[in-house]
Amino acid sequence: MAPGRKGILKRTLRAGSWIGLRRFGRMLPFGGTFVVVVLVVDDVRRKGLVGGVVNSAIDAVPFVGIIKNGTEIVFGDLIPDKNSRKKLK
């Protein structure tokens, strides 16, 4: 394996594990609420003010957040990011 590819693979795995950890943390019943509060700024930045607040509020409700994240794993985001909405138009 080329020396540069090993670094890219390592960074990709690290980023992917962080995304998975965030999603898993949101799915935990009450620990997920803490994770959502910490990550609300990121949601607002990606989805806009209204979309980010609504997404974070749904994630913060213990068992509703589990159902929402389970459906998002299968079908994709229920509330799309700002950038993906611009591409659809």
Image (cartoon, rainbow, N blue to C red):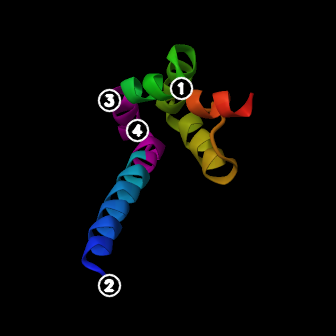
Residue receiving disc 1 = 47
Are the two marked residues, 3 and 4, in contact with CB atoms closer than 8 angstroms? Answer: no
Residue receiving disc 2 = 1
Q: Earlier in the sequence, mark 3 or mark 2?
A: 2
From mark 1 to mark 4, how far is it between C-alphas? Answer: 19 Å
Q: Earlier in the sequence, mark 1 or mark 2?
A: 2
Q: Amino acid at mark 2?
A: Met
Q: Amino acid at mark 4?
A: Gly
- Residue 51, x across and y down, in percent: 57, 21
10 Å crowding of disc 3: few (<14), some (14-19), many (20+): few
Q: In percent of the image, x 62 and y 42: which residue is there? A: 67
- Which circle, 3 or 4, is nearer the viewer? 3
Secondary element type, mark 1: helix
Residue at the far right: name it. Answer: 89
* Residue 81 visible to an observer of this rendering: no
Q: Which quarter of the rendering shows the N terminus?
A: bottom left
Q: In percent of the image, x 46 and y 47: which residue is there? A: 23
Tell me: 57 left or right of 36. right
Q: Earlier in the sequence, mark 3 or mark 1?
A: 3
Q: Earlier in the sequence, mark 3 or mark 4?
A: 4
Label drawn at residue 38 = 3
Are the two marked residues, 1 and 2, in contact with CB atoms closer than 8 angstroms? Answer: no
Residue 52, compared with residue 4, is above or below; it is above
10 Å crowding of disc 4: few (<14), some (14-19), many (20+): many
* Residue 9 visible to an observer of this rendering: yes
Secondary element type, mark 2: loop
Residue at the far bottom: name it. Answer: 1
Residue 80, compared with residue 13, is above or below; it is above
